[in-house]
Amino acid sequence: MTTQDDPDYTDVSTGNMPSRGSERVKILTFAILAIAVAVTGYLFRNSLSLESLAQQETVLRNWRETNPVLVFALAILLYVAVAGLAIPGAAALSLVYGWYFGFWPALIVVSFSSTIGATISFLVSRFLLRDSIQSRFGQRLQAFNENLEKEGLFYLFTLRLIPAFPFFMINLVMGLTPIKTWTFWWVSQIGMLPGTAVFVWAGSAVPSLQVLAEQGVSGILNWKIIVAFALLGVFPLVVKKLMAWTRSSDANANTKEAT
């Protein structure tokens, strides 16, 4: 754990309630963003439909082939924004990237983009929204600090593998703990990788958008999709059992050493 001399240390023992002015600014900002998103969605509702995208599928793939750097840069920026701002749709975006880029390129893009987004949320929490988050998640923050003290980095790794809380909440609350930014980064990168791989793999098995538009959900039910989502459901249970077994083994070993 870090100390007060550590430049990455954040003292979370105190916290002031956010002022009404700052709360109004936040509400106004979110209202403007919501209106902008709603207007954009209304204006481009036809262009963003599955049928419309299916008609442009060849164009989209050709654009990826002729402008690979631009396409990957835009894809990374979009995913970082979704993950960093806690915008719903990250899982769906992982599936789309798997379909569009293929498994390995999409896995790299999604894995690093999701970690960058999570770290941005972590840093925003630590340096900009500390008082607001402290007042909202104070009790949970105490529990996070206690578990970090007991289990160390293994606790964050467990949360990433088997999220007991939404990922955005983990990012925000972890920003108020003494954990270092680099440590948060690499533990999150490794912990989120298995789930990311399953979603991207499922997306890479999706057929053409034309088939999906014509056949609906039945058009994507192949063995790879079924296996991928079965793994998604089973994986957390297996990890939880392994972790429980590891802790039990450690406890028995410590008991034997004590006797």
Image: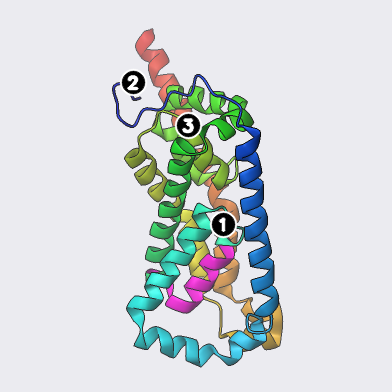
Helix, strand or loop for disc 2? loop
Is tag 1's residue or tag 3's residue first in the polypeptide sequence?
A: 3
Q: Are marks 1 and 3 in contact (CB under 8 Å)?
A: no
Which residue carries the number 3 mark? 176
Helix, strand or loop for disc 1? helix
Helix, strand or loop for disc 3? loop
Residue 121: percent from left, percent from top: 48, 46
Residue closer to the observer: 135 or 101: 135
On the question of residue 191 being in view, the answer is: no
The N terminus is located in which quarter?
A: top left
Is tag 2's residue or tag 1's residue first in the polypeptide sequence?
A: 2
Residue closer to the observer: 244 or 210: 210
| Residue at the (64%, 66%) spot, across then down | 37
Which residue carries the number 1 mark? 232
For disc 1, the neighbor class at 10 Å (few under 14, some 14 to 19, many from 20) is some
What colour scheme was applied to this rendering of the protein? rainbow
What is the quadrant of residue 15 in the picture?
Answer: top right
Q: CA distance from mark 3 to mark 2?
A: 14 Å
Q: Mark 2 vs mark 1: give the one in front.
A: 2
Residue 216: percent from left, percent from top: 70, 81
Residue 226: percent from left, percent from top: 60, 68
Is residue 100 shown in magenta? yes
In the image, residue 62 above or below residue 243: below
Provide the residue span drawn in magenta: 91-104
Is residue 196 shown in magenta? no
What numbered label is drawn on residue 52?
none
| Residue at the (49%, 59%) spot, across then down | 81
Q: Is residue 10 left or right of residue 30?
A: left
